[in-house]
Amino acid sequence: MKDKIVFDVETKNSFEDVGGRDNLEKLDVSVVCVYSYNHDTYASYREGEWEKLAPVLQNAGLVLGFAITRFDLPVLKKYFPFNVMALPRLDLLDEIELAYGARISLDVLAKTNLGTQKTSHGLQAIEFYKQGDWDRLIEYCTHDVRITKQLYDLIRKQGFINIPKRYTNELIKVPLNLKEIEIPATLF
């Protein structure tokens, strides 16, 4: 059975460093963290280990994450000889935005639905990289993967996610039917 993986990407540089959000291809990846459903394990792949990450992505029946369609996958494109944008994927942010009508942060979703929160933010992850603090960088990235996995599991179990209304914090129950279409990952 093909694996289902949850992943997150951290970069060495910021949008400001590369001239804005229109220059995603100029961002450089520092680490990718992955959760495997088949193995029930977390793993991290640092710069220079992309050849180890490639088969994990290629052999997945489904890759999932938060904002992977507009950030993670486009940033990864330059590192692989196959089309990462063609991987079978489920982007929680895309699904939530489609159902709710607006973007909502991973941190807000985690606080509201899981009673936890992100440990830091992407700009801090860049600082961890610049300081050579791989332990904190990997811990931060893995925590985001863990939150994404827990949100995905919760949505699959209950069929909805709670989103707080801005200014009132009244909870809105947003129904979600996550579509999991597994496509053979032979993308050469």
Image (cartoon, grey):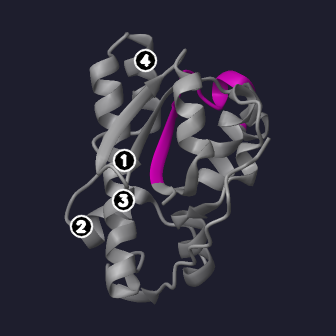
Residue 164 vs 43, above or below: the answer is: below
Q: Amino acid at mark 4?
A: Tyr
- Labels 2 and 1: the sequence-earlier one: 2
SS label for mark 3: helix
Name the secondary structure under disc 1.
Answer: helix
Judge by depth and name the residue closer to the eye, 99 or 64: 64
Residue pointed to by mark 4? 129
The answer for how far apart the CA atoms under marks 2 and 1 are is 13 Å
Q: Residue 144 has which mark?
A: 1
For image coordinates 55% across by 15% down, the residue present is 48
- Tell me how far mark 4 sits from mark 1, CA to CA: 16 Å
Point out the tag, 1 or 3, that comes first from the N-terminus. Answer: 1
Q: How many numbered discs?
A: 4
Q: Magenta residues, as a range? A: 5-20
Residue at 47% from the left image edge and 46% from the top image edge: 7
Mark before the other along the chain sequence, 2 or 4: 2
Q: What's the CA distance linking mark 4 and mark 3? A: 24 Å
Quarter of the figure with the C terminus: top right
* Residue 54 image point, x, y percent: 60, 33
Q: CA distance from mark 2 to mark 3?
A: 11 Å
Q: Disc 3 designates what residue?
A: 149
Q: Which mark is residue 114?
A: 2
Q: Is residue 16 above or below residue 3?
A: above
Q: Of marks 2 and 3, which one's residue comes earlier in the chain?
A: 2
Is residue 157 highlighted in magenta?
A: no
In the rendering, at what x and y percent does residue 102 appear?
Answer: 58, 73
Label 4 near label 2: C-beta < 8 Å? no
Q: Position of residue 60 (x, y in %)?
A: 55, 52
Q: Is residue 69 left or right of residue 175?
A: right
Mark 3 nearby-residue class (10 Å; few <14, some 14–19, many ≥20): many
